[in-house]
Amino acid sequence: MDVYEAVAGRRAVRGFTGRPVPGEVLERVLSAAAQAPSASNLQPWHVYVLTGRPLAELKKRAGERVASGDPWDEPEYEQYPPTLKSPYRERRSAFGEQRYGALGIPREDLEARQRAAAANWDCFGAPAALFCYIDRDMGRPQWSDVGMYLQTVMLLLRAEGLHSCAQMAWAKYRTTVAEILSPPDGLILFCGMSVGFEVPTAEVSRTGRAPLGETVTFVGDQ
C-alpha cells in the first residue's frame, strides 16, 4: 500500500471484530512511527498499549461509569473553543448530522445519540487500544508534534491492513484510564485510539472535506 492509498483509506472506524492484533505488528508500527517529526526531536508523546485482560478491565470500569451516569472527569484541556465561529461551526454540525444520520438517529433523539457515543468506551469492540499522553509542561508546538505522530501511527496501521479510531472521548474518563495504566502525575491524557480489524459489514461513512480552495492558498508561479 503506497502513502496515497493509506491516506485515502484511513478513516475513523467504529466497528471492530474481536480478532487479536498481533503484538509484533503493533511493535513494528510504533517503532516506525517514532520517525515522525518533532521540534528539536523532543518526541513529546508517551504511549501505552492495552490488549487482553487489562483492556477488558478498562472497558468494564468505563462501562460501569456510563451505566451509572457518573459525571465526566474535569477536563485538563479544552477539546474545542467555547464558541466555534464559521466555517468551523458548520463543519462540526455537518459531521454530527452525517455521523448520526448514518446510524438512523435523528437530531432530536439525544438518548440514542448518547448510546451511540457510549460505544467509545468499549473501543467499538476493538481488541487493542493505544493511550497517548503528553507532559503537562509542553506547549502548543509539542501538542502539534503529538498530532503528527498519531497520524503517522494511523497511516502505518493502514499499511498493515488495520483500522483505527482516535478518541479524545477517553480524556473524559481519564481517571479510570489512570487506574489501569498508573501514568506519572506529570502527564495529561490527550486521547485513546482503538485499533483492530474492521467488521466487514460495518456501515462505511466517510466525512466530507472542504474544497481545496477553502483551506489552501497558492502563492507564486505555477
Image (spheres, rainbow, N blue to C red):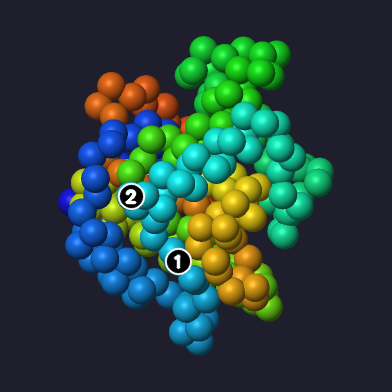
Number of on-image labels: 2
Q: Residue at x 71, y 43 (%)?
A: 72
- In front: label 1 or label 2: 2
- Residue furthest out toward the right: 83
Q: Secondary structure at mark 2?
A: helix
Q: Please rate how many residues cluster around mark 1, counting C-alpha atoms within 10 Å: few if below 14, some from 14 to 19, many from 20.
A: some
Q: Is residue 83 left or right of residue 9?
A: right
Q: Residue 48: x, y in percent?
A: 44, 64
Q: Residue 57: x, y in percent?
A: 46, 46
Q: Name the mark on residue 144.
A: none
| Residue 94 visible, this angle | no
Q: Residue 156: x, y in percent?
A: 29, 58
Q: Amino acid at mark 1?
A: Val
Q: Residue 9: x, y in percent?
A: 31, 42
Q: Residue at x 43, y 35 (%)?
A: 124
Q: Residue at x 65, y 73 (%)?
A: 185
Tell me the CA gap for discs 1 and 2.
17 Å
Q: Name the residue beneath numbered marker 1.
A: 47
Q: Name the mark on residue 52.
A: 2
Figure quadrant of the C terminus: bottom left
Q: Secondary structure at mark 1?
A: strand
Query: Vertical placement of 99 versus 61: above or below?
Result: above
- Of the pair 182 and 78, the residue shown nearer to us: 182
Mark 1 / mark 2, whichever is N-terminal: 1
Residue contact at pointers 1 and 2, CB within 8 angstroms: no
Q: Is residue 93 left or right of residue 182?
A: right
Q: Is residue 211 left or right of residue 136?
A: left
Query: Vertical placement of 188 versus 108: above or below?
Result: below
